[in-house]
Amino acid sequence: MNVHESEKIAGTLVSLGYVATDDINFADVIVFNTCCIRDSAEKKIYAKIGDVKGLKRLNELLIVCVVGCMTQQTGMSDTLKSKFPFIDIVLGTSNVHLLGEKIKEISSFYLKNRKKIYEITDSSTEIVNDFYELRTSYPNAWVNIMYGCNNYCTYCIVPFVRGRERSRSPQSILDEVKRLLDEGYKEITLLGQNVNSYFSDNWNFAKLLDAIGALSFKFRLRFMTSHPKDFSSEIVDIMTAHKSICNFIHLPVQAGSNNVLKAMGRQYTREKYLDLISMIRNKIPDCGITSDIMVGFPTESDEDFFETLELVKAVRFTNAFTFVYSPRTGTVAQKMLQIPANIKKERITKLIELQNQISQEKSYEYLNKTYEILVEGVKDNDLACGKTSNGRLVNFKCGESKIGDFLNIHVDKVKASALWGHIENGRE
Ligand code: SF4
């Protein structure tokens, strides 16, 4: 989601006549697109903003901007002002569409009259559709279908910094997707904090997925993120009805114990999650399922953690984003009794080992089979890579193939958990 927001920011700058540079020393405008979802990302961004102070001394005309969800936290605007007085523009998540206007505004003043712009409004109900985007992820194009979240999981800061859910109109999404496919994009990924609760003009997510999946182009359709409490068999039925929709679901479980799920406010149980997995596998046996799993949430006992490991063994995710809980200011979980760091470390190590072993074992299921892949990367040394519909990356000798081609690849080798194959025949 942040990558796509950066594409919108880059597009804004290009529309003002700026060009991208790889060398920060030559920049006229620097925009930090921040994220506060994890504590580690926030710490890193402070260091990076601090690094720019010297550049500002060398070039007083340099415009330094900070945007993104970190700016939206209570008191952050004052913190940025006092820690980094050289910042020129700070915009909240609801104001980022004003970036171009604000850059024009301050660059039109002589230096001595230049003012600082800090505009953070509370969570917005507004949706801005007409961003000019500088897309960098061909053959994939990200498409936001909704913004914000209504769930208030007790560890998460998103609803506070990104506001309540608001869905784009189905027509504006369909128009954007058709335009992207006309422009030659081969994969569309629909984005939202919880795409399953999409609702606009009496369209739910299943109806939207159905309409996009039916578009008569050769393309792939993915979506993320799904929330288990809202994920339905109707969505899986739509997935099976359209070839364009990939056999892939990212379904964050977060924890395998009902005690922890309840304390997290996730609004589903271990049993409901396992039922969803059975339903998906019954309807789409080769569906790639990935997850987010957190360890060390306050209240997580040894038994609770054991249940998480057991759930991972039962589901056998293709892959999982595993991480250690870190408290976020203003959340309910921050005020709960915290688990010691050494216990968190032990648990994450065990979880990663288990998931790595499963991912490796699952890799062998691909051996000696042929898959259609979409070429996503080509390297100088005749190597290319692309994903199967169910989300596994395959490496192969690229020959004449180029990014955006659909190819049939026969998997003939598994190294560690990476898949290697060769082209059987190609089709664009
Ligand atoms: S569903 Fe929960 S974890 Fe996901 S963004 Fe919303 S509050 Fe955060």
Image (spheres, rainbow, N blue to C red):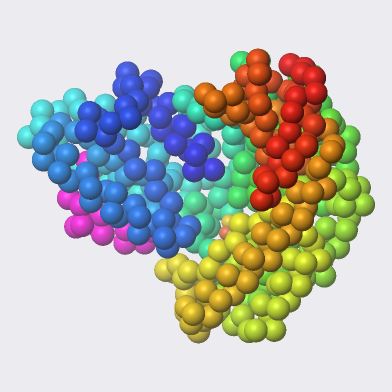
- The answer to whether residue 388 is left or right of residue 114 is right
Magenta segment boundaries in residue numbering: 72-88
Residue furthest toward the right? 282
Residue furthest toward the left? 112
Q: x%, y% of residue 194? A: 65, 51
Quadrant of the displayed image that contains ligand 1 = bottom right
Q: x%, y% of residue 218? A: 76, 21
Q: x%, y% of residue 117? A: 25, 42
Q: Quadrant of residue 221?
A: top right
Nearer to the camera, 50 or 421: 421
Name the residue: 31% across, 22% down.
Answer: 18
User: Is the residue 37 above or below the residue 411 in the image?
Assistant: below
Name the residue: 28% across, 54% down.
Answer: 47
The quarter in which the N terminus is drawn is top right
User: Is the residue 9 above or below the residue 67 in the image?
Assistant: above
The quarter in which the C terminus is drawn is top right
- The answer to whether residue 38 is left or right of residue 178 is left
- The answer to whether residue 62 is left or right of residue 315 is left
Q: Is residue 332 visible?
A: no
Name the residue: 74% across, 66% down.
Answer: 312
Residue 256 counted in the magenta span: no
Q: x%, y% of residue 79? A: 26, 59
Residue 87 counted in the magenta span: yes
Name the residue: 47% across, 32% down.
Answer: 7
